[in-house]
Image (cartoon, rainbow, N blue to C red):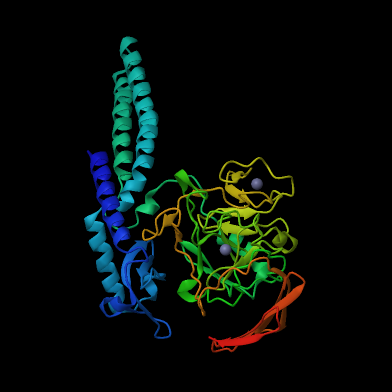
Amino acid sequence: MRKFISTFLTLIFTIAFNSLLIAHPEGHYKKSDLPSLHQWNLNCNNQQVIGNFMMQRNDLILIEGIEGKIWSIKLNELDKADKAYANAEIEKINRLNGFNNLQTESKNSNNYFIYLLIFGGLALIFYGLSYYAAQKNLNTNVRLTFSSLSVFAIILFFISCKKDTPNNGNGNGNNVVTTGIPKTSTSFIDSAFTPYKPKISTNWDTTYFYVSSTGIPNHNMMVGISSWQQQVPIPQNYTGTNHWSIPLQPVYATTPMSTKTNFMKGAVAIAVNGIPIFNALNNRGEDSYLIGELDQWGGHCGKGDDYHYHAAPLSLSTTSGLKPIAFALDGFAVYGTKEPDGTNMQTLDTCHGHIYNNGVYHYHGTTNYPYVVGAMKGKVVTDPTTPAPENQILPQAFAHPIRPATSPLRNAVITAFTAPSSSAYNLTYQLGNRFGHVNYNWTTNGVYHFEFIDTAGVTTTANY
Ligand SMILES: [Zn+2]
Ligand SMILES: [Zn+2]
């Protein structure tokens, strides 16, 4: 019966979400919807976020603003009134569905089987012993003891099953899943990020490990790109509620989601230097590395002038040694081409990882497709507003564009990228035997000044 209800609810949800997606391909709300959206007040710095409650995951809520923008905010960061409002929304949704419970059901039926095996077995053994005692005309007390133990085992079976019944509606169904995977130690994750501090910063709670960064790596960028969209790196604000979140308790996915057909949008992992790692395929489904879109370090810039990798940032092993070079957004570590003990990399599965000697799963970065993650070994929550293959993992940080997206400059090759100051970059590209330049700088208030010198020597400027 419960199975039937679950299937029915899933069906209703699929229909509901799909109809919304058809109606609003660019997210649910447009600029003109702003006045009707909820205004959330945060505890710190009088910050505000405008959008509607979308979903809850543990102590985070996701808020959807206009044009598909999603914020992940901790419940504790909301002011008192909005915290109460969020809790009411969570309760409303939990009353409407058993969403979290759908995911835990199959695990629980596995547990029932194990309990049946243990306690059923014990009951049978004790019953057999009491039968044996009766046949041999042993002391009545001995017979009674064995009979009682047999009944006791049956009672224990029922108690264990009852304890494992999914809790209804407190929204923490994810915590119920018994994974067998140990919770990742925060000191272990932090030790992987430490070599890149203070350029990046980290903190954590009981659910997530958080990484804040400017999205600018400690190595040079851009040189080597031969298929260039004319985007350039600018610092990003991956801080505050827009930080990167690594789940501390990975949970194996029933069916790992392949990066061939999912996650064409957003990051699949966060490198230990604070740079996101995107799918090896770009958002047109092409191997970014093979078509020359990436620089010597495996990265390039997106439409928000946000620097990110598509290939494995293996150069980080120079600084990181045998420590992880990244963490996937399902919570599993990503190592370089060696095992943590310095031995050669073991055979990888289709997810691009394996279970290590310590019993814990990890991925490896390699020089061939899929480079980092072939499929998400761990369970992830995806954005319900963007259907596959553009289904991005949530929560994750978002880039903030400062200028309209640019178009490809065919046959241009980036030959140099320098930083004349800590708030300026000069990019040089070659087209045929002529050179062009993009020189830009920014103020602390986030005003950007661009100077474009094309291959004919004509200069144009723009401020954003
Ligand atoms: Zn990209
Ligand atoms: Zn390994």
**Residue 416 screen position, x and y as percent:** 74, 73
The answer, for residue 193, to whether it is visible in the render is yes
**Vertical comparison of 31 with 2: above or below:** below
Residue occupying the far front of the picture? 456
51 horizontally vs 195: left or right: left
85 horizontally vs 291: left or right: left
The image quadrant where one finds the N terminus is top left
Front-lying residue, 212 or 32: 32
**Residue 229 screen position, x and y as percent:** 59, 68
**Residue 447 screen position, x and y as percent:** 55, 88
**Residue 208 screen position, x and y as percent:** 48, 63
Q: How many marks?
A: 0
**Vertical comparison of 228 with 155: above or below:** below
Residue found 35% across the figure and 37% down from its top: 109
The answer, for residue 98, to whether it is visible in the render is no
Front-lying residue, 212 or 444: 444
79 horizontally vs 254: left or right: left
Q: Could you say which quadrant of the image residue 144 lies in?
A: top left
Residue found 59% across the figure and 77% down from its top: 234
Front-lying residue, 366 or 162: 366
Residue found 25% across the figure and 53% down from its top: 97
Residue found 53% across the figure and 86% down from its top: 464
Residue occupying the far right of the picture? 433
